Amino acid sequence: MLKLLRFIRPYREALGLVLALAFLQSLANLTLPRLMADIVDAGIVKGDTGHILRIGGVMLLIAVGAMVCAIATSFLSSRIATGFGRIVREKLFAHVEQFSLHEFDTFSTASLITRTTNDPMQIQQVLTMLLNMSITAPMMVIGGVILAATQDASLTWVLVAAMPVVALTFFVIMKQAIPLFQAMQVKLDKLNLILDEILGGVRVIRAFDRNAHEHRRFDVANMDVTDTAIHVNRIIAFLMPAMMLTLNLTSVAILWFGSGRVNAGEMQIGALIAFLQYAMFILWSVLMVTVMFVMLPRAAASAGRVNEVLAFTPEIVDPAAPLPAGGERGCVEFEHVTFSYPGAEEPALRDVSFSARPGEVTAIIGGTGSGKSTLVNLIPRFYDVAAGRILVDGTDVRAMPQVELRDKIGLVPQRAVLFSGTIADNIRYGKQDATDDEIERAAAIAQAMEFVSAMPLGFDSPIAQGGINVSGGQKQRLSIARALVKRPEIYIFDDSFSALDFATDARLRAALKAETATASVFIVSQRVGTIMDADRIIVLDEGRVVGIGRHEELLTACPVYREIVESQLTLQEAA
Ligand code: ADP
Ligand code: MG
């Protein structure tokens, strides 16, 4: 919590103002009961109307002043706290943006979302209270006790006895309620999860006729949240009456003992009234401080979760002294590269070496989970290697700025991702200042023209969020066009032709050939037909290179490759 408070720095002046205003407000409030005592004793008891009006006027002015201060304090403290929340969210977002895929694997996306939205909100709420009360509450308690004691020292023990009772009553009730609040948060998360699954998987649920089952699952979670909420509210319902009861009992006790002293002539009526008011100030402040102590642990937990993210140093950072990429454009070399995912027992890639030159097509083939995607994801430095090194244009990828490295690469990921916007927007994602001609050309090479021109709005047709209004194959072709429009030195197609039929696949590769004549191309595929004529085929098996060479060479030299080819050829022949 304290560590996070550094983000409040831009609001230093406002902060000083808030504290000063709170000070003034408390001071004003503390003078009122004394003036009241004066009105009662010197005015009402003696029948001096002039005195009543004069002091009354002063009281009115002070009360208005206190009110203005109070309004300004809460206005400013809300401004500071919301500004603080904004800064924390901004820092979190900026920090998370630098995360490598490793760190994204460590924190789940859902957790990162709550950590940037809900957690700063919790801290922000407590901060508002803290700003409002950090001056007011101690001043009211300490000043109140001193001033009450000057009214009548022997009554003060009633106050001293009442303070812990108020704090304790509140504490006992909240101690029951707090665990339930936390349980409720967990149950709410679960309800959200179920709802998310049901809404996302609605097609599967209907296809497998699991409506009733999912409905029951939702009902159970929903009921669970409801029960806890009712339970918590039942406890909280006791809070206000219990607090009022303690406050009123204290008043009664003060009046009881005070009136005895007034009767005995040891105390004036005005003093008793003032004392009663001080007592209320004090107990109310004690109550507020207790409220804050109850909220503090929750905010501290949130602060802990926020700090956890901020303290995570991204593994992949730009080098302090970046080297310029030298040599040819579009060279990729792997030198004895070994790589493991965190927590995995076996390395996903083991001792991989090869080099690819501009104008060449390097194909990567292998079974599912053999490490094909892992291999190509190392080129844009989504992860760092454990051993060995990767050179792009003769420079270690870890030695150049990430922006420069990624500028050279056009990646078509295995799972095509489109953003909401138009088709043209999505292709232009590869090159912001691409002209309409460039976009059309990229779409033509990616074999996307056919379906784009069939759409009523052509390139201006909207893509829905997540690209759900285009088919899998259309999505793939648009994401290929997006990489093509960039005209990079290195093309990476990770299983990007899998959703295309054989004829479109062949046409696309033919069109690509001219386009990529001076670039190096990586094609990951499971289909022998797609990669047969590559300059170099890398055969992966459980993260190891078991064969490397041209189609004809591998047919005789590599049993794993021959197996793949045979299984597919027999299938095709059979079909
Ligand atoms: P391919 O693309 O050849 O199907 P991948 O490169 O995606 O295979 O995966 C290779 C291996 O690495 C698999 O065993 C897979 O389970 C594992 N793997 C892939 N991605 C991750 C990840 N983000 N975290 C942990 N393990 C992963
Ligand atoms: Mg893959």
Image: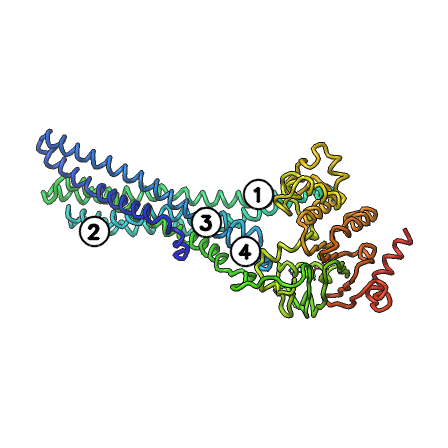
Q: Tag 2: residue type?
A: Trp
Q: Secondary structure at mark 1?
A: helix
Q: List the residue tagged with mark 1.
A: 222
- Report the mark closest to the observer, 3 or 4: 4
Instruction: Count the numbered circles shown.
Output: 4
Q: Secondary structure at mark 4?
A: loop
First in sequence, mark 4 or 2: give its number: 4
Which mark, by number, is residue 98? 4
Q: Secondary structure at mark 2?
A: helix
Q: List the residue tagged with mark 3.
A: 120
Q: Secondary structure at mark 3?
A: helix
Q: Tag 1: residue type?
A: Asn
Q: Is residue 61 left or right of residue 358?
A: left
User: Is the Cβ of the residue at disc 2 closer than 8 Å to that at disc 1?
Assistant: no
- Report the mark closest to the observer, 1 or 4: 4
Q: Nearer the viewer, residue 297 or 230?
A: 297
Residue 94 can be seen in this image? yes
Q: Residue at x 72, y 43 (%)?
A: 441
Q: Is residue 470 left or right of residue 140?
A: right
Name the residue furthest right: 574
User: Is the Cβ of the residue at disc 2 closer than 8 Å to that at disc 3?
Assistant: no
Q: CA distance from mark 3 to mark 4?
A: 20 Å
Q: Is residue 227 left or right of residue 462?
A: left
First in sequence, mark 3 or 4: give its number: 4
Name the residue furthest front: 327
- Report the mark closest to the observer, 3 or 1: 3
Q: CA distance from mark 2 to mark 1?
A: 50 Å
Q: CA distance from mark 3 to mark 1?
A: 26 Å
Which mark, by number, is residue 328? none
Q: Nearer the viewer, residue 484 or 315?
A: 484
Q: Nearer the viewer, residue 472 or 158?
A: 472
- Report the mark closest to the observer, 4 or 2: 4
